[in-house]
Amino acid sequence: MNPQSLPTAETIAIGTELTIGQVLDTNTAYAAAGLERLGFRVVCTRAVPDDWALMRHAMEEALGRSLVTIVTGGLGPTKDDFTKAVLHEIFGGELVEDARTLRAVEERLRRLGIEMLQSNHDQCLVPSTCEVLHNDFGTAPGMVFRRGEHLLVSLPGVPYEMEGLFRERVTPLLQSLTSGARFHRTVSLYGTPESTLAEELKDWESSLAPVFSLAYLPSPQGIRLRLTGNGVATPEMHQLADLRLAELEKLLGDRIFGHGEEDMPMALARMLRAGGRSLATAESCTAGRLGALLTAEPGASHFYRGGVVAYSDDAKLRLLGLDAQRLAREGAVSQWTAEAMARAVRERLGADYGLATTGLMGPEGDGTDTPVGTLWVAWAGARGVGSRRVTMGNLRRVNLERSAFLALNSLRLFMLGE
Amino acid sequence: MNPQSLPTAETIAIGTELTIGQVLDTNTAYAAAGLERLGFRVVCTRAVPDDWALMRHAMEEALGRSLVTIVTGGLGPTKDDFTKAVLHEIFGGELVEDARTLRAVEERLRRLGIEMLQSNHDQCLVPSTCEVLHNDFGTAPGMVFRRGEHLLVSLPGVPYEMEGLFRERVTPLLQSLTSGARFHRTVSLYGTPESTLAEELKDWESSLAPVFSLAYLPSPQGIRLRLTGNGVATPEMHQLADLRLAELEKLLGDRIFGHGEEDMPMALARMLRAGGRSLATAESCTAGRLGALLTAEPGASHFYRGGVVAYSDDAKLRLLGLDAQRLAREGAVSQWTAEAMARAVRERLGADYGLATTGLMGPEGDGTDTPVGTLWVAWAGARGVGSRRVTMGNLRRVNLERSAFLALNSLRLFMLGE
């Protein structure tokens, strides 16, 4: 089966805040991923401003082209939200009060101690031409409209409401429309530039059967390699994909840190939990990002002890007990400081591993000779201490993200070498 | 001047990783914000997969509709990237080597110690029908194509390359095409639900002149209110906007924390720096997010001392010196623990303020009676200690973000009350 023959879907996110770039749109990625997993071919994702004509044009175009259209946003209680009115114009019918939504909204507002307002009442009105998707996560209901075999689903723009409705109401609705014919295998690796990797994988890639395609997805968190099987997802196809993946894993060795949706923090968490090991962090330049990354998923208390955000010299002295004279002599961004931090936090929290960062993230220097973009990462374990110096550019945001992932990967490699 | 009469622009992001929701697209928001600031009306932002026909269709549609089209992505060295080939097909011409790009790529790879490969050579080829935008941030050059008065600009998909090129090369190119006729004023506030706020502002909003429009942008970080002036941006219009904004500020009082692009961490940084005050953090449930938020912008070392990620009880005892028996009696998620953490970190780091969080972020409970979604925030200053309990839902990701912003806002209100 050619990917071109999969049922098509698309998404439309509504809101001037998106088209003027004031708010980052996460709903589109969530809906697109969901549609893809359900076996649709997503041919377009877009955002349009709160503008009647542009909204209507986008909805009509999508309805005419794709089997399924997911519209997110524009269902709030305020004047600038009129997705429902546009849909009412397109699909007709009367505005009717949805009793179940009204009860749920009343109950919800009572629980939060918020007064029921006219705008909340208005949120319970829906065109009679739609099927209501009840929203257990907020006040605005989802709506499903049909034109022939084409479906348009309207969902609220608040991300966790949209995600909840998509997961619990939209997914069952769409499951019957596809044959789940496309599938992906993803591996993630760290430490090789994209062009070098492409050269290294050239022969392997050329030898892939035409039903497979390979995509490179680079970011400061590493490179994800996505192998897509564009055919009927038979057991044989899955087996073949697994075989090719095994070859890829052999080529890339321990540069691969994760599979599927597993990112670097999840991979490290898996390794630490599997070995029954614990970790403590001492962060100067990353200032809490390691802790935040390690605790994003549930279950972090099984391996993460916490640590110190040693952003100032004072914190390095008072919370980690570093030697003041030595710190002054070596400088905050130095191998000695990084290693002393990793060792100290490991000892103070009785953890199996200590992981430390110290660096100059920019854009300005600190008045010393240390170039902007310098990072020292250090790790400490029962077998001793190690460290690594890296030089980056002067883009603060990029440096902060790269530093955190470099540190996590350094610990991963240290653990693999043990 | 009606907003409908502004020159139009749109964006197209290329990549199956976007349309299957595997990667969050930040380029679109960046380009859309830039186009908006330059005085364009952005009528559509979209993403299309790595598919020749869909890419070509989107580009032709945008070229036929908008004065300016920004295309991002699909310029990498690997096989799945073919934006340049599609543009070559649309605009014609010969593929020629751009000498300046070649020199820059050679120099860049030499510096990074990476070997020059055929794929890097290929990146230096451009259609003779384009004008090259030299890329100081990476290897793939930007390209500008023209059809009549319509412009299509192709930029690499790596965010900091795209952003650098947009800022330094695209902005000067587009500046002459608009009259900068639209403008926004944004204020951000915290602590009022959207529907309550809309009710509160109803009279003020109805009294706005028709040239103004108001948008509500809610998120776990608070609500941004955007007042848009849809007319010629004369001094009188700006003055009028300032007057209406002053009224809004009076209505909302100290719920407003920032103006324009200022978010909560930036607002707190401004207040701390203006008062010459310093801050230390003790984070249990937020696990480093406060530190990460406070250090995202340059200059944090002027006010942020660092702190402790007291994720485990051990860390609360060993790094903050909490009383072990009392901690066991009160529990980790309690008023006493939160206040003791805030007090301890303030004292240990000699900071003016201490800010602490402890809570149960979910989705699972911790085996005690404490409900999932419970958060204690505490703050300590020269005038004493305060704390607040909040109950949230059981969505971990939402709880983590809300907890961090609740904590920052609590400190802000405490500082305002001093």
Image (cartoon, coloured by chain):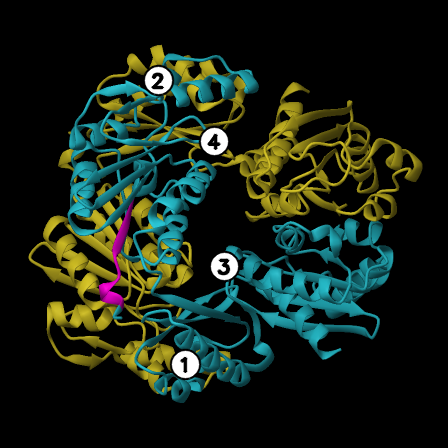
Chain colours: A yellow, B cyan
- Residue A264 image-quadrant placement: top right
Distance between the alpha carbons at the discs numbered 4 and 2: 37 Å
Give me the disc on residue B395: 3
Mark closest to the chain's N terminus, 3 or 1: 1
Residue A39 is at least partly visible in this image: yes
Q: Which residues are magenta?
A: B3-12
- Viewer-proximal residue among A410 and B60: B60
Question: Share a chain, discs 2 and 3?
Answer: no
Give me the disc on residue B198: 1
Distance between the alpha carbons at the discs numbered 4 and 3: 42 Å
Q: Which residue is mark 2?
A: A244
- Viewer-proximal residue among A141 and A51: A51
- Viewer-proximal residue among A311 and A171: A311
Q: Which residue is mark 4?
A: B136
Element assignment for label 2: helix
Magenta segment includes B11: yes
